[in-house]
Amino acid sequence: MLLELSEEHKEHLSFLPQVDSAGQRAWGRCSVGWGGGQRQRLALNSLLTFIAVVAEFGRIAVEFLRRGANPKIYEGAARKLNVSSDTVQHGVEGLTYLLTESSKLMISELDFQDSVFVLGFSEELNKLLLQLYLDNRKEIRTILSELAPSLPSYHNLEWRLDVQLASRSLRQQIKPAVTIKLHLNQNGDHNTKVLQTDPATLLHLVQQLEQALEEMKTNHCRRVVRNIK
């Protein structure tokens, strides 16, 4: 299962290669006139700096998911990278979406690599993103489960069929109505909802629910549900 990234998300993620190229240019200027061994050490330092920056962006993305946006963190990172805070924020949001959607679906390593391949990143950056995903997917799924709303669940149902046979304006008529009293549980509390509809609408609702239940038996839906749990 591959992720479908919108053009907006691709644009936000395009900031990550700029971090790599900025570091390489900075270290490249410092290495002019130095020996081969020193150049190798500088190249290694540049790579380590890039890895640290991407890892930091991954940490910020997880914090963003847990606690929301933090402008101070964006401003601090923007000063270090010499870019605008909006650019950093968009990069974090793009990375958050990538990690969140991948973790929701629990996509395989191969599918993740194929999903980010379309972004045109370097092999090193693709490996870093894959490692970020593998290191954080369990925590992200835990956070998502905590953020999920507590929805009411079914407890009991009562129904009554009423039929109006006549009125002042029309002495002979048949106007059925179904009244439903739905008992629900939510966070240990009980509440009820009273609904009323005509038999035709109720029949249509039953047919739609039966269709949904049949759809849940397909291999595609079973795979999605298994990945969400």
Image (tube, rainbow, N blue to C red):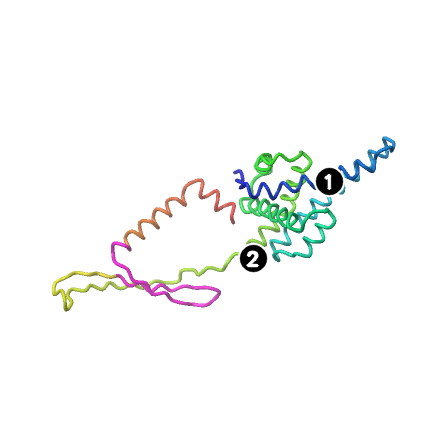
**Majority secondary structure of the magenta segment?**
strand
Q: Amino acid at mark 2?
A: Glu
Residue drawn at x 25%, y 58% is: 198
Q: Amino acid at mark 1?
A: Ala
Mark 1, residue position: 22
Residue drawn at x 41%, y 41% is: 218
Q: Is residue 198 left or right of residue 13?
A: left
Mark 1, secondary structure of its residue: helix
Q: Residues within 10 Å of mark 2 (few under 14, many from 20)?
A: few
- State the CA–CA distance, disc 2 to disc 1: 38 Å
Q: Decide: is 220 above or below 166.
A: above
Nearer to us in this view, 145 or 72? 72
Q: Which mark is residue 146?
A: 2
Q: Earlier in the sequence, mark 2 or mark 1?
A: 1
Bounds of the magenta span? 178-201
Residue drawn at x 62%, y 51% is: 139
Q: Is residue 156 left or right of residue 223?
A: left
- Which image quadrant is residue 172 in? bottom left
Residue 181 magenta-drawn?
yes
Residue 199 magenta-drawn?
yes
